[in-house]
Structures are given as C-alpha cells and as structure tokens.
Amino acid sequence: SPSKNHAVAYGGGGGGASPSSFRQRLSQNRRIRSIRLWYKKKVQPFWKITIAQILCVIYILVLTFSPPPVGIRDPVTNDIIDTSSEENTNNGVIYVNGSYRAVVAIGAWQKFCLAMSRMSAFSLYPMLVVVFFTKMKGIQTFLSKTPLSMYLGVINQGHDFHAHAGKYIALDVCKLS
C-alpha cells in the first residue's frame, strides 16, 4: 500500500529505523546544514549583486534573441544574421546602430555558443564594477557617511566580496575554456 511504502521509505513502518538508515539521514542532515551555512556566509551577503547579474543576463538575451526592433534575430530564419546585407553575414558581422558587430550565429549550436558567451560576459559586468568600486577608498569613505551606506554592504565586507568575486570569475572563465 502507498502508506506502507511511504513509512518504509522514511524509516517507519513498525520495525523502527535501522542504524544504517539513521546514520545516512544524520549525514544528509549535516550536509544540508553545512550547505545552508555556506550559503548564509558566502552567498547571501551579495544577493544584490547576484540580482544585478541576473538582470544583465536577461537584458542581453532579450537584445540578442528577440526579433527586430528590440533584438537582432531574423524573424524569417530565426538566425542571428544581417538581413540587409548578405555580404556582412558572410563576413561574420552585423551592422547595428552604426557599427559592425561580430555576432552572426546560424544554427542551434552557434546560437547556443553565442548565448553562453554573452551570458558569461554580461554576468561578469556587475561583479567587475563592484570590484573596481571597492578599490576606490576615497569614495568609500565619503559614501560610508551618507544614508547610501545602508545599501552598500559590500564596502564593509571588502575581503569577503573579493574572495566571492574571485571564485565567481574563476568559475566563469574555467567553464568556457
């Protein structure tokens, strides 16, 4: 019966939990607690930057893969090509807003690679801006004396943020190479 299977799966069912299943649950609970503790210490203090990174990724994906006038995807072929010039497409560029951009992507694999590279780059921008900002001590001192200091927690956690940024950048660079 379903209730008996449920009870057996969770160590109930009249016979009691065996010592090995108890140890497994205890070990799993310890892992979950250590993951939660790691998240609270290392990730949660920088949630505002993570939100900015997600917004940057959404922004670039919309601009790249939406049809005109918002994006640069060809509505007929669904590829990223220069619809006004076949020569530009053959050269691997698109003419957008007065400049040439090397973002031609024909086929699913090329579009996937384009999406990964653009997501990687745009998710790095907020992190790099904040890393640069944390090196400007004069501005930090000025802002720490204003009401903005309530929203700029990174100023007080400079070392932790630099460690977090280094790990993120290393992960981001290593996943693409």
Image (spheres, grey):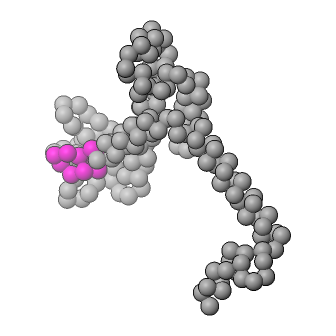
In the image, 77: left or right of 34?
A: left
User: From the viewer's perspective, is residue 101 above or below residue 162?
Assistant: below
In the rendered image, which quarter contains the C terminus? top right
Q: Position of residue 168 (x, y in %)?
A: 55, 37
Residue lying at the far bottom of the rendered structure: 1
Q: Residue at x 75, y 60 (%)?
A: 26
Q: In this rendered view, identify the residue nearer to me: 3 or 87.
A: 3
Q: Residue at x 48, y 27 (%)?
A: 153
Q: In this rendered view, identify the residue nearer to me: 50 or 105.
A: 50
User: From the viewer's perspective, is residue 18 above or below residue 66?
Assistant: below
Asked if one can make out residue 63 in the rendered structure from this viewpoint, the answer is yes
In the image, 16: left or right of 123?
A: right
User: From the viewer's perspective, is residue 54 above or below residue 132?
Assistant: below
Question: Does the magenta stretch mainly form a helix, a strand or a loop?
Answer: loop
Q: Within the magenta stretch, is there residue 164?
A: no
Magenta-tinted stretch:
63-73
Q: Position of residue 40 (x, y in %)?
A: 58, 41
In the rendered image, which quarter contains the N terminus? bottom right
Q: Position of residue 150 (x, y in %)?
A: 42, 25
Q: Quadrant of residue 59?
A: top left
Q: Quadrant of residue 145?
A: top left
In the image, 169: left or right of 109?
A: right
Q: Position of residue 133 (x, y in %)?
A: 44, 19
Q: Residue at x 72, y 82 (%)?
A: 13
